Image (cartoon, helix red, strand yellow):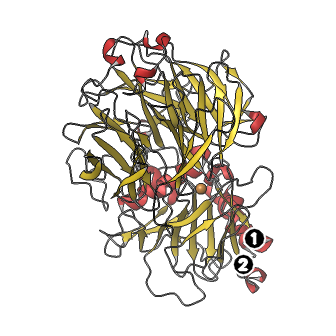
Amino acid sequence: MKKQRILLALLGLLVGWGGAGMAHASGVTFQVTDNPGSWFECTASDSKTKAGCVHDVLGEATVGKSLSVIQRGESITFQSRASHHGSTANTIHTVVSLIYPTPASTPTEKFTTMPFDTDLDVGTRSAPIIPNELGLHVFFCDIHPYMFAAVIVVPVNHNLTNGTLFPLDLGNTVDLHKIVLETLPGLPTASDLALRLVHTFFIITNPANWQQYPVSDTPIKYWTPAYPSVPVVAHVTGGGTVPANLDELLRGYFGEGGPTVANANAPYLKQLLAPVPPAAPGVGQVWVDTQFEMMSEKTKPGTATAVDATTFNVVRKVGLPSINMNNPHNMWTDKDQTVIYQTQWFDTKLAVFNRSSGQFVRNIEVGAAPAHVMTRTNNDQVHVSQNGDNNIRELDSLAAGNGFLRDIPMQTDPDESAHPHAHWMSHDGSMMVTPNADTENSTLFHFPSNSIKSLTPVGHFPIATGMMPDSSKYYVANFLDSSISVIRISGGIATVKTTINLLEGYAVPGQYDVLSPTVAPIGGLPIQTPVSPDGKYAIVANTLAAKILVIDTTTDKVVASLACDAGCHGAQFGAKKGGGYYAYVSSKFSNRMIVVDPNNGSDAAIVGSVLLTATGTTVIDGSVSKYAGMGGQGVLPIPLVYNGWVQNLPEEWKDQLTAKQKNPFPSAH
Ligand SMILES: [Cu+2]
């Protein structure tokens, strides 16, 4: 849409603003949904304020559905409706301030104090939030941290009819709750980190901006993300301003070029090259949760996609329309590699299906927002994290029935809830470690003594863990403050050995400046961080800077950085045929999987990638209707080759591995 048309459209819809609509309490409502991109969907609370949802004016393809503009004094309400055309929320969500204007004054009673933080159970709505400060407010769910809603607060009576709506002022400085707040309260809105986060918001919440890789390079396909073409003002340190068209500002800043950016030309655009698989085959299969892929036979998003690791063809997709499988997030398998355990993160259930046939086996209630699942090597029990609660649910091997054994609390204080996300089990099945997003610590649970041995403080929003093959050490990815806690286990007790800061510069370590783009950060917003079966390196998927980082486990330093896709998320190791390993990496806002050969760590290389869309030979239990191959999250290579699991494999799988792969870390006892 051309800028003039957008302004005319806004003019048409904003006439109500400051008029009759202001006579009574008004504002916008964000509806919680399970729908990719628009998890917090802006809807009007009444027709008078419809213009508050920006997509009603600019169109969904331009801005997604999660951006609104309100006048100071208007309210923001979050609602989790029980039933509405597949917009049903099936589990707990939260509404938490991620970015908000630095408070200039203490709000009077009418206004809401920031940062805001509330739980949103199914069928409830939040109290109306009335921001005191003008400028940019971003809220997120701190269970599902890519559910975003943004609100720009403008002065009372600012609208188009009197010519005062534009430029939209993002505000002087913002506080980034838990990101850099302690070290730098009040980050200018034109600073590098603030712009990176604004950019991230528009990539995540607008599916039109996702990276859709093509089947072939004819014709050449470019990634051309677009942003609202409206005048804005951002502020630099010391009070100066950067007035700009938002679309041109972001495209220019991030080198995305495009026809509307002055002086930009095609070389600035990122070409989306048709994925070319690795030349050397892997062993077995790789399952990827294409969590956003939709089927016409069901209302909830998500499929599990199986790639044959010997040919890198997509051989199967399992969407389970019969149970309306909802946002499949992470997987594991039993010791015989017979079934796939599949968490449904926006729900309360674990689905089980047959790996070879794709046949549905059962759907089991496991608690609030189940995120990750793993087995114990000594008994094949299944452990599922309740990301919206305090426990890890323990199940038997699910040969029959619902398998319920017990809920294991990850936090002993009855007033606290751990919200564990991606746990990891030790090679001998004796220990389990969790990253507790809400309590910002990591639990070390010891099964033989049935007790929590350590609650180790880590960074902000710990989200994933990975453990050494002898359980001597583990890595915790701290999502919000962009760090990795390296935790040593000695005598059954966990202590922090060191912390790796992913907001350092890569070329010049320590030189990343949140204010300027001179040196890019090495990573940021890290998620999965598995350790290779031979214990040589950990791989970290970073979503902010879209990087795959390799950490050498002998030095605990980052030794390699590789380009990833938007929303870089999942990583797991699988066997490479003839010896060694591949790290398979998924990205939420891309339709391909990246294959990394870690080699010796510092010489790690991307050796290929695999398009995750169905082909003519893919066996599928429904028809893909939208977001084909998108939403890469959990990754599960078959067979399991981690130390402890690999020794339990049936002979038919062991026969495909080298002697070293069958016993990857001989010194573990
Ligand atoms: Cu959520």
- Residue 68 left/right relative to 324: left
Amino acid at circle 1: Ser
Find out whether the residues at labels 2 and 1 contact each other: C-beta distance under 8 Å. Answer: yes
Q: Is 47 located above or below residue 464 in the figure?
A: below
Residue beneath the point at 31% across and 54% down: 517
Q: Measured from the top left, where is residue 409 in percent x and y?
A: 50, 55
- Residue 643 left/right relative to 158: left
Label 2 secondary element: loop
Q: Measured from the top left, where is residue 179 in percent x and y?
A: 38, 62
Q: Which of 63 and 95 is in front in this view?
A: 95
Residue beneath the point at 51% across and 62% down: 417
Amino acid at circle 2: Ser
Q: Can residue 500 be seen in this view?
A: no
Residue behind mark 2:
26
Q: Measured from the top left, where is residue 336 in percent x and y?
A: 54, 21
Residue beneath the point at 47% across and 63% down: 244
Residue behind mark 1:
45
- Residue 440 left/right relative to 202: left
Distance from disc 2 to disc 1, alpha carbons, whole Å, reads 7 Å
Outermost bottom residue: 108
